[in-house]
Amino acid sequence: MKQRQEPPDHAIGRSRGGLSTKIHHLCDGNMRPLVILLGPGQGGDAPMFEHVLAGLYVPRTGRGRPRTTPVRALADKAYSSKAIRALLRRKGVQAVIPERADQIANRTRRGAKRGRPVGYDPEAYKRRNVVERSFNVFKQWRALATRYDKLALTYRGGVVLRAITIWLKALGDTP
């Protein structure tokens, strides 16, 4: 088993609200977390995207290799970048990420050609609320919302424990 190292900053960073930690996670369509990473509060979301996607490992129920790429990636405008779109294209994942307003303005300023607009499925994007609701389920735990833990490993343990309870509740609801 791989030994986890404590980050030197304990995944605590300064944001507008003070010292905080960001939880980066990937979930399935039923709000169940599949990959969980911690980062400092002032860190951006987009730089963590590749690490979160690389952590995906879903074993098959029968025979076969585990699934390591999703069919589509639903994300908000914070993840709209050429690098992320290129990564998803290389992996064969459909990007359902709208373009930011500044990117649209830069593209339209190019003159008559105006560049090619980003294509994404607006109907599929309506399901992105699942990600936001999944974060809200995590935030219902006071220990995660307040971050009283001194060490990132302890805090991550609480996040993983919450993920386990979410999975157990989901498995208990199925017949």
Image (spheres, rainbow, N blue to C red):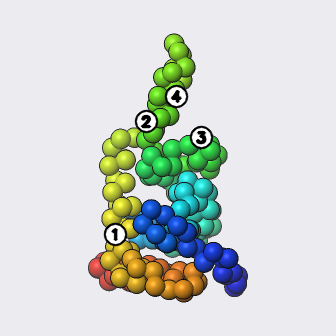
C-alpha distance separating marks 2 and 4? 9 Å
Question: What residue does disc 4 label?
Answer: 106
Question: What residue does disc 1 label?
Answer: 136
Residue in the picture at 58% in, 47% down: 84
Kind of residue sitting beneath label 3: Lys
Kind of residue sitting beneath label 2: Ala
- Residue at far top of view: 112
Q: Nearer the viewer, mark 3 or mark 2?
A: 2
Percent across and percent down for residue 160 are 49, 81
Q: Give residue 63's mark.
A: none
Other-residue count near label 1 (Cα within 10 Å), few / some / many at <14 / 14–19 / ≥20: few
Percent across and percent down for residue 52 are 57, 63
Other-residue count near label 3 (Cα within 10 Å), few / some / many at <14 / 14–19 / ≥20: few
Q: Secondary structure at mark 2?
A: helix
Q: Secondary structure at mark 4?
A: helix
Q: Earlier in the sequence, mark 1 or mark 2?
A: 2
Kind of residue sitting beneath label 1: Asn
Percent across and percent down for residue 48 are 58, 60
C-alpha distance separating marks 3 and 1? 29 Å
